[in-house]
Each structure stands twice: as structure tokens, then as C-alpha cells.
Image (cartoon, rainbow, N blue to C red):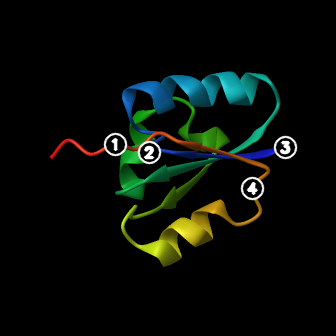
Amino acid sequence: MRVVVMGAGGYVGSRLVPGLLAEGHDVVATFTDVGSASRFWWAERVEAVQMQVLDRGSVRDAAAGADALYYLIHGLA
């Protein structure tokens, strides 16, 4: 199953990804800055993609082909 985790770099997302990998899922992890994915030990095991939540096209691209989607993004302002 292909699972997209939007907000993979946050507190919840960064803990969800290893669980999904352990269950055998193919994980797409989204980041505002895809370079920040490297700080996670699991970065080499996922497809890290850049996504801007306010850009419909990048959200659409990130979600393409997903069987499941976790949307873990919130606004602080």
C-alpha cells in the first residue's frame, strides 16, 4: 500500500512513518523543504517530496497514486 504522510517532519508524522514502514507500506513523506528529511533515520526508506500546503498543484502531485493519506498539517498563526 502506498501511504502519503503530509507533515512527516512534525512530531506526530515523524513517529507515524516508522510504524508504517514496519507494517510494510511504501511511504511518501512530504516536507516544505525536502532537504530537511535527512535529519530522520528513516529518510532513506521513504520517498521524500517537497510540498507546499497552500499550492494545490504540489498537494495534488504528492497525493497522486496514494492508497491512503495522513494529513498532519496545522496552522500556528
Q: CA distance from mark 2 to mark 4?
A: 20 Å
Q: Which residue sits at x=77%, y=63%?
A: 65
Under mark 4, the amino acid is Ala
Query: Crowdedness of circle 3 by 10 Å Cα count: few (<14), some, many (20+)?
Result: few
What is the three-letter code of the residue carrying label 2? Ala
**Picture layout, residue 53 above or below residue 26:** below
In three-dimensional space, the C-alpha distance between marks 2 and 3, rounded to whole angstroms, equals 21 Å
Q: Nearer the viewer, mark 1 or mark 2?
A: 1
SS for callout 3 = loop
Q: Give the residue type that dot 1 points to.
A: His
For residue 51, the mark is none
Q: Is residue 39 above or below residue 2?
A: above
To which residue does mark 3 refer? 1
Whether label 1 touches label 2, CB < 8 Å? no
Pointer 4 with pointer 1, Cβ within 8 A: no
Residue that mark 4 sits on: 66
Q: Earlier in the sequence, mark 2 or mark 4?
A: 2
Lateral position of residue 19 relative to residue 10, left or right: right
* Residue 37's disc number: 2
Question: What distance separates the C-alpha of mark 4 from that of mark 1?
Answer: 21 Å
Residue visible at 72% across and 30% down in the picture: 21
Q: Earlier in the sequence, mark 4 or mark 1?
A: 4
Mark 4 secondary-structure assignment: loop
Amino acid carrying label 3: it is: Met
Work out whether residue 34 or residue 51 is closer to the camera in this orientation and state it: 51
